[in-house]
Image (spheres, helix red, strand yellow):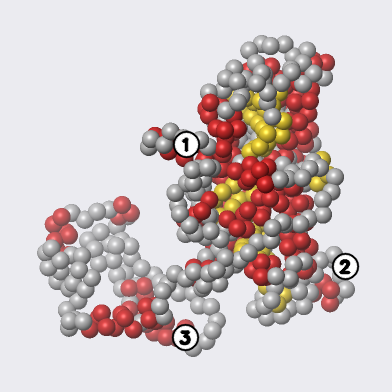
Amino acid sequence: MTNLGGHDLPSLLEAFEAARQHDRPVCFIAYTIKGFGLPLAGHKDNHAGLMTPAQVEILRERMAVRAGHEWEPFEGLGLRGGEIEAFLETVPFVSKGRRRYRAPTVPVPPRLEFTAQGSMSTQQGFGLIMHGIGKLDDDFAKRVATTSPDVTLSTNLGPWVNRRGLFARQEVADLFRSERIPSTFNWDFSPKGQHLELGIAEMNLFIMLSALGLSHSIFGERLLPVGTLYDPFIERGLDALNYACYQDARFILAATPSGVTLAPEGGAHQSIATPLIGMAQDGLASFEPAFVDELAIIMRFAFEYIQRDGAKEPDEVSWLTDAAGGAVYLRLSTRTIEQPRRDIDDRLAGDIVNGAYWLRPPGPNAQLVIAYTGALAPEAIEAVGLMAEDRRDVGLLAVTSADRLHAGWTAAQRGRERGLSHARSHVERLLAAVPGTCPLVTLVDGHPATLSWLGGVHGHRTRALGVERFGQTGTIADLYRHYGIDAQGIIAAAQVISVGKPIRYLQAH
């Protein structure tokens, strides 16, 4: 059992030559012995096994490697001088030129348009924004490539697919239309299609996003990949997502629905840890907007961000490494909430992208600040309205990216440790005017640790609300009340952290 096919060079060469005879994909399964040719070959303990110095010496002598020449590229091969170097210079892998290409950036429109509605969800808004992109006839729209594991329609990509089509190497007509089966969606496949339908396979989704997101460096052609899936199932493909980011692949991931807000479907479709994954995953900037106008600003930023390839050092304004770029994760919701009517100026847009803004700024005598992210905006707003009856000053902080707030804060701290006394992050500036005696209550439809660190920025007492257990089924109101993330739960937390200050309306409501 020592000369298996994977170690048989003549058999491998024969297989490679046979694969050249056609253009079909070929998979090679090479049977090998781990540690082949070494004293620990095939041993069950060799996963982290190391050879002894004596064994290394025996191997060196057997391979005709001179002592002290172990790192010479062609040591021990016994070939005539320059012969192997000349051969390697002509192999296709080298002779075709540089292996890593560069592609020009694709201009992104100044605004991503969508049809605003009085009440809508961020998932619905995502679909409207993608539909708006699908209507464009420019290089930007032509470079967008979407993919999804079976949830194309339920993640609101249907209108985009209707306009841009599904990709296939050969044209395939829509079977439903040809058989006269009613459907609101067109599923024509062709080489011109811009959506790739994967079936239920989240691991394949991230492998696909990784491949599409490296096209600019592998082929010199830039694509703008967008993938959608249910937020809970990020964990199904987490290994592939990690390696995609490790390879510096560039893509936008829209994960929806999220949290316990998809209440009727129970624990199988509820996500708790994903906000922390978004914060911890290197090479991935995560956002969780509450409103669609925020989402439009973030998506426009994201399409530019995934194309950047600049300095990896943080700038001294936001203390984020935005010039280097990366992939983007959007944690969205199916919950329909009332949308604000407002014009977003450049300053507010910058705050949204940097991670947070004041929806209700606190005054100099602030008694409480509530910081929320995502779909729990209505509960936070309601709680502030109720508490305003008894408290003259309650601030409301809208967090659009806990990830970027935290990244900027930690980078600014490192800057100060290096002697840059002027280093101040976005979150430090936002909370600078909040009195030290003012407590914070944070709110997220996910693990409470997502925002619990906000109290550490300037030393404010903090009560972090969120979801630590899953499995409950019920209405959204039932689940929010069960986990203490409804308006009354926020008020109760505020009462306790405010060191016993009475809140008369708590029982009245």
Could you give the CA–CA distance between mark 2 and mark 3, rounded to whole angstroms? 44 Å
- Where residue 160 is drawn, which disc sits there? none
Marks 2,3: beta carbons within 8 A:
no
Would residue 280 be seen by someone viewing this image from the given angle?
Answer: no
Q: Where is the N terminus found, in terms of image quarters?
A: bottom left
Q: Where is the C terminus found, in terms of image quarters?
A: top right
Counting from the top left corner in percent of width and height, residue 32 is at 36, 68
Would residue 391 be seen by someone viewing this image from the given angle?
Answer: yes
The residue type indicated by label 2 comes to Pro
Specify few, some or many for label 2: CA neighbours under 10 Å numbering under 14, 14-19, or 20 or more.
few
Residue at 79 percent of width and 25 percent of height? 385
Image position of 224 with respect to 258: above or below = below
368 on left or right of 153: left
- Mark 2 vs mark 1, foreground winner is 1
Residue, disc 1: 423
Could you give the CA–CA distance between mark 2 and mark 1, rounded to whole angstroms? 60 Å
- Where residue 182 is drawn, which disc sits there? 2
Residue at 60 percent of width and 58 percent of height? 304
Residue, disc 3: 20
